[in-house]
Amino acid sequence: MQTNSTAQTSSTAQTGSTAVQGQSLVAYIAWRLLGSFLLIVCLWFFISRAGYYFALDGTADFYLFEDAENAVFLAQEGIEPEILNSEFRQFYSRFEDIPEPVRGLIDDQGHARAVNKTVFIETPKQDIYFLAYQPQPSAPVFYLLHRFDKEDTLDLAPLFLFVGLVAFGAILVVMLAVIYRLKSQLALLSLHLKKPGQEQGEDTPDLMIRDFNQALLSVKHHYREKQQAIKREREFANFLSHEIRQPLSKLNTNLALLDQLDDLPYASVEIIEDVKQLSEDLNQISGAVLQLWLEQGQRDESIELAGLIRQLSHALLPEGLIHDFTFALESVELKSNYGLVRLLLGQLIKNAAQYADSYIHFHLHAQSLEIINDARLSETCDPKDYGYGLGLVMAKKICARLNWHLRINQQKDNFSVVLEYGNSRC
């Protein structure tokens, strides 16, 4: 049941419980929707402002050239274009006739001699559009001004901004409603998952999102399969317990009846003792197997490890075997499955007692337990076969169940196992 390899190590896979990590689906969608919304608002604001001014410039160009063409038509009819003058529109035949303040602003921009090109001039009180118009290269140039007082000008930018904000506000309300509905559906899905055995519509409303509904149905399907598998295992375990214990019980009864007989042949006594030992071994093995099978789902409880080790060692070790204890701590408290821990320690202690020659040492540390024994060689037992017995295999299975580690070390004259239980410390 033990190994003689120089440094053989056997450890169970650790599957420690980890905290739930990751971002909420609602937060993930909400932040990206709101971020996209703010980006669109900013882009729309700058584009609308730029488009507004470009639109004004295009409108001013249109009306300037339209007035200029009307003036050309009047001139062809012999009518002076000044007849079209008004509060905001003035025609000039010569550049020098333009009022000096305006002419100076035009000169400052360097467009005094540029023909058929609109010039925009902004003053504190007026917006001025200037056009030097020449219908043909040989025709004379005349000058046109459109002047708008700022106090009389309707600024459409705030109206555009208000309409845009109302539109985006409506979009935001819709987005928030979608996020709220998604959050409520996720909460409802979580509520359904807490009761996987319950059908929809019994105590909680149905899910409206099809994807969530499909996920919930898949979880319920796997839950039912798991419950059915657990039920089948329990039924089989009960059957197995009955089928194993009944013949063993009958065997023990028959052995007890044989002990009461006085006229047995002398040669049969040794055979009966061997059968008794085999029966005892079968009882221990079957009890351990059934206990390991049936322990699933038990609650964890506090375990005082030092006292349990002393109790099991005194009960399981033979009288002629020396055993001592070296405890780094007087008391080591664990939070684990008591039945499985007791079964595991019992298997390790019986394993050490079976192959120890003269002593067993127990070294208890804060995070681990080490059991050391000297190795006894037997003519009927090949050291190469150590480590393949049921006891150590069961110990490894129990460690996997408890999420503990088991390390096995074989040296020339002694054998040791190290049981690491640090993740179960209270």
Image: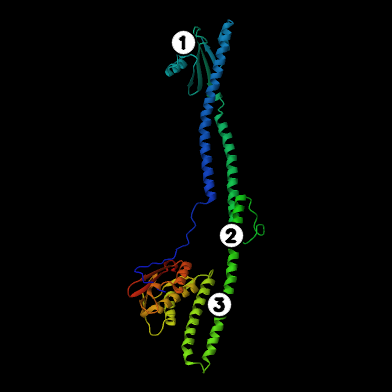
Q: CA distance from mark 2 to mark 1?
A: 93 Å
User: Which one is nearer the viewer's eye here, 29 or 352?
Assistant: 352
Local SS, label 2:
helix
Q: CA distance from mark 1 to mark 3?
A: 123 Å
Q: Which residue is mark 3?
A: 244
Task: Tell me the residue at 54%/17% (across/down).
Answer: 64
> What type is the residue that disc 3 sits on?
Ile
Task: Tell me the residue at 56%/83% (across/down).
Answer: 250
Task: Indicate which disc residue 96 carries.
Answer: 1
Marks 2 and 1, the one that precedes in the sequence: 1
Marks 2 and 3, the one that precedes in the sequence: 2
Q: Mark 2 packing: few (<14 Cα in 10 Å), some, or many (20+)? A: few
> What type is the residue that disc 1 sits on?
Glu
Q: Which residue is mark 2?
A: 222
- Dividing the picture into quarters, in which one does residue 378 lie? bottom left
Task: Tell me the residue at 50%/51% (across/down).
Answer: 23
> What type is the residue that disc 2 sits on?
His
User: Which one is nearer the viewer's eye here, 41 or 350?
Assistant: 350
Q: Mark 3 packing: few (<14 Cα in 10 Å), some, or many (20+)? A: some
In the rendered view, would you say 28 is above or below 394? above
User: Which one is nearer the viewer's eye here, 217 or 289?
Assistant: 289
At which x and y percent is residue 411? Answer: 33, 72
Task: Tell me the residue at 48%/89% (across/down).
Answer: 268
